[in-house]
Amino acid sequence: MAEPSTGRIEMVGVSKAFPGVRALDHVDFAVAAGEVHALLGENGAGKSTLIKIMTGALRRDEGEIRLDGRTVEIASPGEARALGIGAVYQEVNLVPTMSVTKNLTLGRQPRRFGLISWREARERARERLKRLNIDIDVERPLGSYSVAVQQLVAIARALEEDTRVLVLDEPTASLDANETQLLFSVVRDLKSRGLAIVFITHFIDQVYEIADRISVLRNGRLVGVAAREDLPPLRLISLMLGRELERTEERLVTSALPPEGPTVLAAEGVGRRRTLAPFDLTLRQGEVVGLAGLLGSGRTEIAKLIFGAIRPDSGRVELAGEPLTAPSPRKSLRRGMAFCPEDRKAEGLLGELSVRENIVLALQTKRGWLRRLSQAEQEKLAEEMIEALGIATPDADKPVGQLSGGNQQKVLLARALVSNPRVLILDEPTRGIDVGAHAEIVSLIRKLSQQGLALLVASSELDELVAVSDRIAVLRDRRKIGEIAGTDITRAAIIDTIAGART
Amino acid sequence: MKVESPASPNGRLRAIARHRAVWPLVALALIFAVDGVISPGFFHIRIVEGRLFGNLIDILYRATPTAIVALGMAIVIGTKGIDLSVGSIIAIIGAVITWRIHAGDPHFVILLIALGTGLLCGLWNGFLVAVLDIQPIIATLILMVSGRGIGLMINLLYGGTNPSFQSELLQGLSVGHISLIPTRLVLGAAIFAALWLLIRRTALGLFLEAVGGNSAAADLAGVDARLVKYAAYLICGLCAAWAGVILAADTHTSDPVSVGLYIELDAILAVVIGGGSLSGGRIYLGMTVLGALVIQALTTSILTSGLPPEYNLVVKAFVVIVVLLLQSNNLRTALYASFSGRKR
């Protein structure tokens, strides 16, 4: 395919800074008419910021935007729409309880004598869907249709007669393979009609299936742009994760061979439709197994499936040789598993309750409500943990919501440790915490494994995984694709595995 | 802003001002101060017919049913729920008591039946909220709306409109007295103590607050949210049943239409005045009782001050707004800011 000389939309030298962060640093991004352009990058790479500037949700600090060669100012989402730039965001901004018609005409209902003309609204809704070759009953509530159809309705809503640029932000995130194909056929059709399509996704396979060109952002900079044929997966993933050493790649694991301890956890064929393909995984006593993969590859899901926070619909988990039937967090905890979730605020902490109450919660649920830990026992446990993990708090009765991110993470760790687990599952244990606390938590993980604990650590930071893991399970596109063990564990090996260069 | 150490006098003052008990106590003190000015004999307590009499005792006496209901409400609100049906539960309890007395059951058994009926109501609410996952305000609205009708239907079972009854045991619990002290105060104190032990001396309180504060986090920490919510509605139903026993015995009659009318609102108000938040996560039993006392003190004061009783509700609303404003963090921050700004 010939390189288009001018793009339909061109962003030249666009920068954007937020307090304390440079979100975009002189980024060039261009999409030609009739092109599907994949925009890739890990968390915090700047994808969302770029898209928001393109669609008028944010103002750029520097740079220029050209639409069909003409310089334009996009000051608001309304102006973006008027210029023919439509967007479908990740969180579908539709109302599932309202009819398809209402969803498609909300905010621009046709009026007749000052009242809404529903007949005309229905007509317009059908027209919009026809552009995508969809024929559904527009009177039914949107929520009664599959996620794929809802996604198509969202596209239909974004698509005007004169739309020139369409942004699709992770449209396939919750679709299964067939539904994705349905969506792709619509995307191909739109492409053949000359639309410039920006496609954001975490699924590498889909990039190679649908995209004509690929741009990769990392830390607010454009690190690569190439035609699909010229960018093999290995190169793409290296670009996304950064092959150069940004931090010292120091392994804390001293022994070359993985620990030979007894198997404490064995998952066989555990999976759930739309969430994660069935996988096998074992965990030995004193072993740290890392979960590596790109954003959205299924790291969190694997952790939650094993803990029972997401109910698997296939396979089985064995803990110390005994199967875990009808898994739930409660059961897993009683049997000796503990889990620290990634989203501390939403899933981890009880912000109003004190540090002490947060720390003893899991142990208390294990003991049951009648065998309450006395005030003295609670204080002792809390003080021990505050001491052992170096939690910076004036006293154990401070509400945990008032602590810093690193200290909140330590409180969560403390809660898990106090419950005296055999298996500890950590999801992004160092997300959003400062450098000092980061190093402490990494060395703590090693220390715990030396004490015989089996740990499963999901992380987006390869250095961290390389540093602590005895073995690494690699995920891609919601599938476990391989394992790396012992001295083979390097950044490069992980990237190679994700890229499919080796399995 | 400069942070003052709690040891400095100003800092200690602020620490006191931040304590959650301060504003309801200030409100109570203000109400009593106004009473003292208007009717000099307000605080006089005397002994008549072997029992204590006086306005202060009267406030405690009348606040007891509301306070008992409010305690159950505080626990439900702690789980981010609400129970609008408590007034209707009281109506049902009154009807059940009268019905069984007419049927000739032993009165001790009737007391147990009444409490069991309260538990049954709690079981129903808990089923809707915890098992069917219906929003608490809607789920308990069902019993709130139907409960008084159920009471009237129970009255019809033996064909009476507002039938009355006599019961030494039940009336003893309600309007009787143990030496100088009204029995219902002793009963209220016992219920308070039992609830306090249940909430603070088992881990149930921690679980209730965990579920109310962040149910996703509680779930991942192994708390059985369904069971815990169920427990809250059962406790609330039982509290309402005790209030129902007191109120039914007080009026000697089953009057489902008007007994305990709007008591759910006073109970919610008591919880809120006591610093409880409808967004859940914290249970303050003692503060809730204080809240109920503020409400009753206000009502009694208006009645004794010679103001026409018609003013009652409006004055009550005004005082409640003032107490809530004093508790508002936003307003307090704004007041502090403008105060220290003027000083500078």
Image (cartoon, coloured by chain):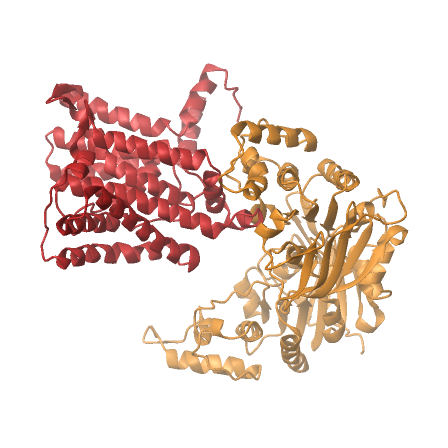
* Horizontal and vertical percent position of residue B140: 32, 54
Please say whether residue A31 is visible from this viewpoint: no
- Quadrant in the picture for the N terminus of chain A: bottom right
Height in image: A442 above or below B21?
Answer: below
Residue at point 85%, 46% (across, down): A249
Relative horizontal placement of residue A50, taking residue B148 as reference (left or right): right
Residue at point 29%, 48% (across, down): B116
**Residue A28, quarter of the rendered image:** bottom right
* Horizontal and vertical percent position of residue B250: 15, 39
Residue at point 75%, 54% (across, down): A291
Along the line of sight, which residue is nearer the eye, A278 or B319? A278
Residue at point 56%, 48% (across, down): B222
Height in image: B186 above or below A279?
Answer: above
Of all chains in the rendering, the one displayed in red is B
Of all chains in the rendering, the one displayed in orange is A
Along the line of sight, which residue is nearer the eye, B91 or A5? B91
Relative horizontal placement of residue A221, taking residue B110 as reference (left or right): right
* Horizontal and vertical percent position of residue A32: 71, 73
Along the line of sight, which residue is nearer the eye, A20 or B26? B26
- Quadrant in the picture for the C terminus of chain A: bottom right
Relative horizontal placement of residue A494, taking residue B223 as reference (left or right): right
* Horizontal and vertical percent position of residue A90: 60, 63
Please say whether residue B207 is visible from this viewpoint: yes
Along the line of sight, which residue is nearer the eye, B126 or B59? B126
